[in-house]
Amino acid sequence: MRKIVNVKIIAAFMLIATACENGFDELNTNKTALIRVDPVLMFNGAVINASYTSGGSGGSVLIYDVGVVQQITTPILGVVSGANFNKENRAAAATLWQNYYPNVIRHTKDVINETEGFPDRSNLLNMTRIIQAYAFMVLTDTYGDIPYFEGGTGYQEQNFYPTYDKQEVIYPDLIKELKEAIAALNASAKIETADVLYAGDIDKWKKFGNSLLLRAGMRLSKKDPATAEATVQSAFAGGVIASNADNASIKHDANYRNGFGVTLNSTEAANYYLAAPFVDYLQDTGDPRLSAIAVRYVGATSGGDQGIGKPTATTEAAAQEGMPIGTTTTSSVPAGVASYYDFSQVDRARMANVAAPIFLVTAAQSQLLLAEARNRGWITTGSEEDYYNSGVRLQMEELASYGAGSAIASDDIDLYLLNNPYSSGDPLEQINTQYWIASFLNGPEAFANFRRSGYPALTPNASPGQDISDEFIRRIIYPSSEISVNSANVNEAIANMGGDKLDTRVWWDKP
C-alpha cells in the first residue's frame, strides 16, 4: 500500500513539473520586447545621418570644406583652426568620418544584410545601395583610400580592423553599384512608403541614383575620360534630377536639428563669417542670392551685437562685407568695418536656421554638370546654354526652401541671366563657378568639384606657418582613432597615397 501511495506522489510531481515546463517559455517571454526591427527604420536612420553634422566647434565641413573653397571662414585660432590657416586639425577632420561610418554605413550594411534574398523588399535593398554609394563617395572624396568593401562590417562580421581600399578600386565599384541598383528598382514591387527621403517614389529614386552616377562620372573627367564619358551617358539616358521637387534633401526641425544651424546659433555664433571671395563675386555680378543668404550686423564690435532681431541687421546685398581670407582676430579691417564681428555671416534666421534643410544632390547641380558634359561632347542632346540657364534658375528657386525671406522673384532671376549671359569664352569656368554657388553649404561637394574642375579661380591662402606646400588643401587627414586603433591598415593606405597630409591628392584629383 505504501508503495502505491509513493508511486502516486511521484506521478503527481511529474505532472506538475511537466505542466510548469510546458508553460515556462511562455511565462518567461517578454511579449512586448522588440524581436526584429523593420529594416526600413534602419534605412531611415542612415538617410537622416547623411546630413552634415557640425561636431565640436564646427566639425570638418565648416572648418575645412567650406573654408578651402573660400565661402565661409573664421579668424579664430585653436579648436577651429583648419582651412582658415591651412592647419592640421585631426579633431575637426574626424567628425565626418565618425558620423558616416557608425551612423550611415553601418546601417546601410545592416539593411542590405537583412533584405538580400527577400524579393518583397527589393526596392528597399536597392534604395539602400544608392544611399550607401552616396555616403562612400563623400568619404572617399574627402579622405582618399578608405575601408570600403569591409567598411561597416564590425557588427555583422565582427571585423573591427577593416582593410583600406584604393580609390581607383572604389570608384568602379561605386559606378557598378549605382547602375545595378537603379536598374533593379521596380515600381511594380513593394513601395517603401515609410522612406523619409522620397516616400518610396521609384521614379524619384531613379533620378537620384542617376544624378549620383552623373556626379561620379564627372569626377573622373581628368583621370579617366573614357569611363567618365560612358558613365555620364548612362546617367543621362536614365534621367537625372531636373526639378527642385525631386531634390535629395534632409529635412530638419526643432527636434532633429540642422548641424550647421546648431553651431552657428550657439557656441560658434560669432566665429564664422562669409568669405570675401564669395561675397565679392556675388556682389560684382549683381547676384540676388547674396541678399537671400547673408546678414550683416553693421557696426558690431562683439558677439553680443549679433543675433536674430538685432536692429543693426541688414540683408541688403550692397551692404554686405566678406571677411578677407587669412584674417585673424588681430588683423586690421577695411574702412567702414568696425571689427571682425562686423563682417557678413550666413543668416541664422534663414539658411543657418536649426530647421533649415541640407541638400545632398540637386536639380541645379545636375543641370550644370550636363552643361559641362554637353560642352565636352559627351552628350549630344540639348544646348550648353539651356542646361546652364536651367541650373542657375533652379538654384535661385531652390532658396525658397529656406523660407519666404530667401525666395527670389522670377523677374530678378531673368535680370541676372540677362546681365550674366552664358558665354563660350571660358565655359568650364563659368559653369563650375555657378556649381560653386549652387553647392553652398554642401561642403563636401563644393570641395570635391573645386578640386576636380579647378574652378572658381581662387587666390591661394598664403597663411604663414601653414601645414601644406601645395597652393590648396587637397584632402582631409585621417582621424587619430584610426591611426591608433587600425594602425596597420591605415598606415598601408597612407603609404599608398603618398602621405597623410592635407595637400596629398586623392586618385582622381589629377594636376
Image (tube, rainbow, N blue to C red):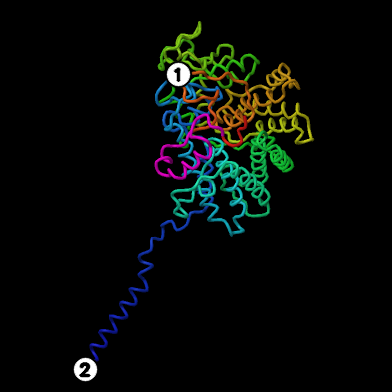
Which quarter of the picture shows residue 428? top right
Bounds of the magenta segment = 477-505
Residue tagged 1? 75
Residue 487 visible in the snapshot: yes
Quarter the C terminus occupies: top right
Quarter the N terminus occupies: bottom left
Residue 139 visible in the snapshot: no
- Residue at image position (33%, 73%) is 20
Q: Is residue 455 in the magenta section?
A: no
Answer above or below: position of 120 versus 215: below
- The span from disc 1 to disc 2 (Cα, nearest Å) is 101 Å
- Residue at image position (31%, 77%) is 17
10 Å crowding of disc 2: few (<14), some (14-19), many (20+): few
Q: Nearer the viewer, residue 486 or 426?
A: 486
Q: Nearer the viewer, residue 473 or 254?
A: 473
* Residue 238 at x, y percent in the picture: 72, 43
Q: Secondary structure at mark 1?
A: loop
Q: Earlier in the sequence, mark 1 or mark 2?
A: 2
Residue tagged 2? 1
* Residue 22 at x, y percent in the picture: 37, 74
Answer above or below: position of 428 versus 4: above
Q: Nearer the viewer, residue 419 or 383?
A: 383
Q: Nearer the viewer, mark 1 or mark 2?
A: 1
Q: Is residue 497 in the magenta section?
A: yes
